[in-house]
Amino acid sequence: MQPAIRYALGIVTIVTIVHVTVAPPTAAAQAASPNACELVDAAEMLKLTGRKDLFGKGPQVQDPSEIPQYTSGCHFLGILFLLDTAFAPERFARVRRGIETHGTLKAQSISGVGDEAYYEWDPRPGNFQMVGLVFRSGNKRVTIGENTHSDSIETMKKWLLSIAKTAAPRVK
């Protein structure tokens, strides 16, 4: 299984927990059609990551059947972007508490991106451990994540912060 797919499955697990523990979106939120690929500046991502778009396809929309309803996903260069609408501050806080109490993930508050943000990561040793940066801008939640070796989590956090800072201004 490819690392991006493993990460997507990890995020789906997290988001599924969130949808179980948090009230469903309102009708207005359900009508919204978020597009996570609008957050991705391909040229900037190529520059920040030093990676190459080997197939020349650019950012790719995540198959809607692989992610929860009312969520948009986009992947590019092995990085997954998820965009959720209707995430008020109270709901964002409940989701974070749920992540910290219902699983093996760790969370750490950060500043400098969105209205509020935190890192989430799997601290268990090994390859392909999920590391994500989750932020709220207004009533939208953005998750940006990648898999890495457990020895590289701190480096990945800094890298994700750089990526998040380029995506945050595009959240509308």
Image (tube, rainbow, N blue to C red):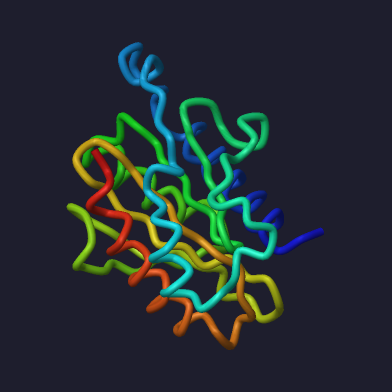
- Name, please, the residue furthest toward the bottom: 151
- Front residue of 77/21: it is 77
Q: Residue at x 45, y 58 (%)?
A: 42
Q: Where is residue 97? Give x, y as percent.
A: 37, 51
Q: Quadrant of the C terminus?
A: top left
Q: Residue at x 71, y 64 (%)?
A: 3
> 121 left or right of 29?
right
Determine the image quadrant of residue 44: bottom left
Q: Quadrant of the N terminus?
A: bottom right
- Front residue of 70/38: it is 38
Above or below, 140 against 31 in this view is below
Above or below, 1 against 26 in this view is below
Above or below, 137 against 41 in this view is above
Q: Where is residue 10? Give x, y as percent.
A: 63, 53
Q: How many marks?
A: 0
Q: Residue at x 61, y 68 (%)?
A: 147
Determine the image quadrant of residue 83: top left
